Structures are given as structure tokens and as C-alpha cells.
Amino acid sequence: MLDASHTAETATFNARELRNAVAMAAQVVERRNTIPILGTLRITATPEGAQVRATDLDMEIFLQIEPLAASGTLDFTIEPRLMASLLRYADDQVTITTHKDLVTITVDDVEARIRDLCNPATDWPGMIGPLSDEAMISEAALHKALAACIPCISAEETRYYLNGIWLHQIDGHACAVATDGHRLARYQTQEPWPFPGQIVPRKTVKLLQRLLRPGGNGQITAMVAPDQTNSTEPTLAPKQPSNRVEFTGDGWRLISRTIDGCFPDYLRVIPKSEPNITATLTHHALCRFGEPHERCRAISIDPVKGRMTYSRPYGPTISMPVQAKGDQTIGFNLDYLRGFTARAGTIRLESKSSGDPALILTDDPNLTQVLMPMRV
């Protein structure tokens, strides 16, 4: 029997909506945590609405869902893998009831009772978002920019300032840049960005891209914490957390810390002179080389002979025609070339010489890509 001094809170959800929200929020949760509550999701529900939250202390996501019915204030935490397994085959409704520290989840004819005294929802370490002016960005444009730059984000931890996308402004418009030192991608949008440049971490960027709809016609609200490095405020503590960015879309909100550091001057490596070597490559042709060997990843492009060649160590040498002009043989990483062509289909290489970076041109005039050559 229920204790009369503690009423039970109940909420009923559409199984598919709750499952999708749990799956998205679970991407924030780290598998290994020294703080138990960081390994959980927080689910709250009232008659006005419901929310699924997750955080790793560097990022927090809020996903709004509409309950079918709710009484009282439902508020509890649960491990995402457990919640996902309960919802895996649900196709109708999910009813959740909380009473003291007992959570009862009813999915079809399955009932799960969970008792957890270690992770009360009141201990949830929520993040404080930035308080600044807002900028409205096209959902489709932001998705294009992130999708173009994500493959070029560095995974090298020593140069930590390259472990994300640099969102900054050029003539007041948002521009996204990412580089790993071997390749670079820059996407120039016509969307407003009235903020200082921010290096958004890789994990945040990938989650943000999944939240956005390709070709969506929605608007994303962006806010950035103001730069307080030159503040004259006579206090040791800032008025609000710095180095944070927030994006809000239809039914979701994402807060994230940004990476401290100075992004390098990428404009120096973008070729500006007239090219002496050009080549047109297709994804279909590059795939015919097969998988590159771990000890040799470069293909050579000989414009004089009109051939591109890949030689495996102690293996076959594969050569095929290529449409190219120039008087020098130049080499590039086969994996990187395939990455560019996989997204564009056909690319055009332009380089001044075999030792200079090459400009990668596609059908998108807003996209600038650069690839460093390899010795062959």
C-alpha cells in the first residue's frame, strides 16, 4: 500500500517519442563515470510537458516531449541502457510512476520496478547556459556547415585547439572551419553570427548535427557567453560562466563548453595563386584502387602521362587514366581523397606545385577545402 503522506506521480508517454528522446540523450552519457549520477538520464514530467536530460559536465542536452497524460511532478534518474532496453520493442504507450524512491515503468505487459537511493534527481549537476543576445541561424545552412567540416576535425590531443570546429564571423556571417593539419574544410554561410569566435568540441558538433534536419526549414537560436578576458569588473568570479555556447531548436536545447585556445590562422594555407597542376577525380574511380595498405596510403597523379597510380608494398601496382594537366607528378592520401569524393561525387584538384597544398573544388561555392600533398 502507498503511504498516504506521499502521493504517487504518474505520466504516460508515446513509446516511440520517448524511445527517440532516450536514444538521443544517451549519446551524451559516458560509459565510464566516477560520479554515478553522470551515468544516468533525468526524466521529468508535469501536466504542462516532459523533458529528458543528460550531461557529462561539459555538455547538457534537453529534449522536450509531450506526455499523453500526467499527474503531479514526475522526476527521476535512470541508466540509459536500462531505459533503452525496456523501450526497445514498445509500440504503444509507456506509463511511469514514482513513489518515494521507487520507480515503476510499465511497457505493454512488462513491468519494471527500480529502486535507487544513490542518484536522486535533486542532485542533478545542471549546467548554466550563456546569457547573451540571440542569433537566428538557418537549420539547413548550419547542418551543411557541420557536415562539411566534421571529417576534418583533428583527433590529436596534443593540439587540443583543433579538436573541434571554429565558428567565427566573416563580414558578420557565420563561418565554420576545421583542420587536422593534413586537410582543411571551411564553409561560409550567409547566416548572422554576431559573436566572438568559438571552438565547439567534436562531441558537441556531432550531436548537434544529429539534432539538425538536413534541408530543414527551421531556425536555430544560438547564444554565446561574452568574452570576459578583458573585463574590468572588480571581482574574481565572473557574473556568468564563460566559454559556453547554446543552441536551441524545435523541441531541444544543447549547452556546451567551448575549447580554450587560439585557432590557427588557416587563411595562410589556402592557395591563392594560379594553379599549375589540375586534376578531376571521381569517387567511382578512386574506389577501384581497393583498400590502401597501412604502410602506403598515397596515390600519385602524373598529368604528363594522364595516369594515377597506387602501388602496394610487396603487392600489385594499379594504374588508371585521369583527366589532369601540369608538368609535375603529385601525390595525395587516398583515404582523404575518397572522403572528399564520397561527399561530393566529383572533385577538382588545383595546386601550384607538387610541394604546395591543393585546393579541392566542388559544386558548392560556399565550401573551401584544402589537402596537403604527400611524397611519392
Image (cartoon, rainbow, N blue to C red):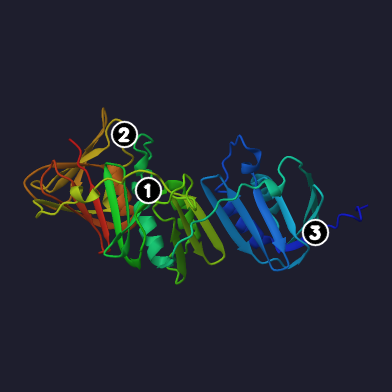
| Residue nearest the observer in this picture, 208 or 16 | 208
3D distance between C-alphas at marks 2 and 3: 59 Å
Q: Is residue 138 left or right of residue 340?
A: right
- Percent across and percent down for residue 17 are 64, 62
3D distance between C-alphas at marks 3 and 1: 46 Å
Q: Residues within 10 Å of mark 2 (few under 14, many from 20)?
A: few
In the structure shown, which secondary structural element does the residue marked by tag 3 occupy? Answer: strand
Q: Which residue is mark 3?
A: 9
Amino acid type at mark 3: Glu
Asked whether the viewer can see residue 150, the reply is yes
Q: From the image, state whether disc 2 or disc 3 is nearer to you.
A: 3
Q: Residue furthest left?
A: 327
Amino acid type at mark 1: Thr
Q: Residue at x 44, y 66 (%)?
A: 134
Give whichever of discs 2 and 1 has the lower sequence position: 1
In the structure shown, which secondary structural element does the residue marked by tag 1 occupy? Answer: loop
* Numbered circle sitting on residue 229: 1
Give whichever of discs 3 and 1 has the lower sequence position: 3
Q: Residues within 10 Å of mark 1 (few under 14, many from 20)?
A: few
| Residue nearest the observer in this picture, 136 or 275 | 136
Q: Is residue 11 above or below residue 59?
A: below
Q: From the image, state whether disc 3 or disc 1 is nearer to you.
A: 1
Q: Residue at x 39, y 56 (%)?
A: 146
- Percent across and percent down for residue 50 are 67, 62
Q: Is residue 367 above or below residue 119?
A: below
- Percent across and percent down for residue 268 are 18, 48
Q: Which residue is mark 2?
A: 293
* Numbered circle sitting on residue 220: none
Give whichever of discs 2 and 3 has the lower sequence position: 3
The image quadrant that residue 143 belongs to is bottom left
Q: Residues within 10 Å of mark 3 (few under 14, many from 20)?
A: some
